[in-house]
Amino acid sequence: MARRTIFKRDIKRYSLPPVSNNKQLTWGGLNTNDGTTQIGDNQAQTLLNVKFTQDLEKRGGFTEVNGTAIDGSTGIYGLFPYYYNNGVDRKLIYISHTVAGEINTATGATDSISGITLTSNQRTNAVTFHDLLILVNGSNAPQKIDESTGSALGGSPPITKYIALHKNYLFLAGNSTYPSRVYYCNLDTPETWGANDFFDVNPNDGDLSTGLSVTLDTLIIMKEYNMYILYGDTPTYTEGLTLWRIKKASVSTGSVNQGSMQLYGKNLFYLSRNSGVQLFGGSISTGEVEVDNLTSALASKDITPTIAKLNESRFSQAASVVWDYRYILSVPNGASTTNNLCLVYDFIAVGWSLWDIPANCWSTFRSSGVDYLYFGSTTTGKIYRYTPTIYSDNGVAINAYYKTKDLSITNPSDSKLFRKFYVTLNKAQNYSLIVKTYIDISSTVADTYTIAAQPSSSLWGHLVWGVDKWGKATTAPSDKQVMNNRGKFINYKFSNNNLNETMKIRDFTQYFRIEGAR
């Protein structure tokens, strides 16, 4: 996706005609790992509740789906799309307190499903197989939902926390007695479990299983500090098929839980205990050399100090989703015991943002041909829908801001006179933009500007030549702001904290001159 210019410069020298020079930057992600003068020109030193589209934009908001909280609930511990009958029938299933139920996303009505046995407030994982939604939580025997009724899964499978479906086998892991053991059902029969149908992955190594995932033709078996890959077709000899084999990936990290693990294309994102958010990816071959050389990369280097401030003791409750070209990871920040911060990685902008959505679990759900994003409350029986085009969090204003690098623009030793700036806004809606300037790495605001964005039906006669764009009736005219600031560095903070207002910044152009230049 193309990005727009946000900074340019016009350097005027004493006796010479004005000389225009452009320094082009794009809206980029957060960098708390480097100094405010050392981060990329297109990075933010701090931000909250913004996303990167064609504009720098306030994120969308959320509204509650069920006006009445689910009885007895102190949080939603699972949300799962349940599609059966060849996808014709669709339900959004929730786990709350000791109840599994269905929520009508149109009316908000909730209906519990009888026959399900659950211990209170246990994080739940699920897959759909043979039109059954199969649930595991580490405390109860695996349960199943068969359309509108529930019961224990047949075949007496073991109690486990994690579940995956791969090549028509159901895999289970995370048994408290055998934390390195992986169990599997008979081929294509999820309710038939043999007494010896399991394998141990480096048992008694002091590590324990933390999740299962599938990427391409392999099963990923996560431990807390290690990762293993199962490849092949079958556990027993079958002519024409290859036997299962397990290889350790060349990584020194594992995942904190299955909730943080998400696939995007060929890549697996996960939160590690000791090395931030990792990206394990690329095409996985079944050849030994290729498997042996597979490794992961640190995806969160730019926000290492941000991750260091998270509540590591609560990493086991991390929850994530991939939606709208973003990996969204909910985690507890600071001393919080519940998820109160989202680390948001933008695949297109290739950068991080932070959102303050309190999500205990996530799910996408398709309705009328559209995928919607839902999440469950961390403390109540409420389920919410995220909507990109509304700008309140269930009636509460969204505080959005973006603070740029401390920019020298030219040589850092140059003293500059900052004369004026133009900001080009997407004016499809009414909102106010606050722009604050800071000079020479000071925390003191130099000036504050309030700029109103109001839709206009005609722009003729309002263009600023060389700044505005033709054919974009919602983005011009640019707003000129006169300045009279001197310094070697400057940064800008853009913000909006008004209820039901967006913030969409297309371009920003700074005019200045170098003092004493000849």
Image (cartoon, rainbow, N blue to C red):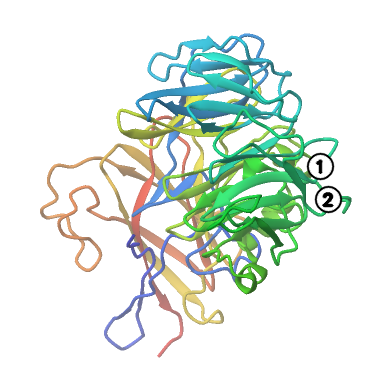
Residue pictured at 65% horizontal, 55% vertical: 244
* Amino acid tagged 2: Asp
| Quarter in which the C terminus is drawn | bottom left
Q: Earlier in the sequence, mark 1 or mark 2?
A: 1
- Residue under circle 1? 179
Q: Secondary structure at mark 1?
A: loop
The image shows residue 206 at horizontal and vertical percentages of: 88, 51
Give left or right: position of 72 versus 414: right
Q: Against 23, is 197 above or below?
A: above
The image shows residue 339 at horizontal and vertical percentages of: 66, 35
* The quadrant where residue 117 appears: top right
Q: Secondary structure at mark 2?
A: loop
Q: Are marks 1 and 2 in contact (CB under 8 Å)?
A: yes
Q: Which mark is residue 123?
A: none
Residue at the bottom extreme of this rendering: 518
- As rendered, which of 383 and 4 lies closer to the eye? 383
Which mark is in front, 1 or 2? 1
The image shows residue 189 at horizontal and vertical percentages of: 57, 33
* The quadrant where residue 320 appears: top right
Count the marks: how many?
A: 2
Residue at the front extreme of this rendering: 239
- As rendered, which of 346 and 59 lies closer to the eye? 346
- Residue under circle 2? 207
Residue pictured at 59% horizontal, 59% vertical: 242
Q: Is residue 328 visible?
A: yes
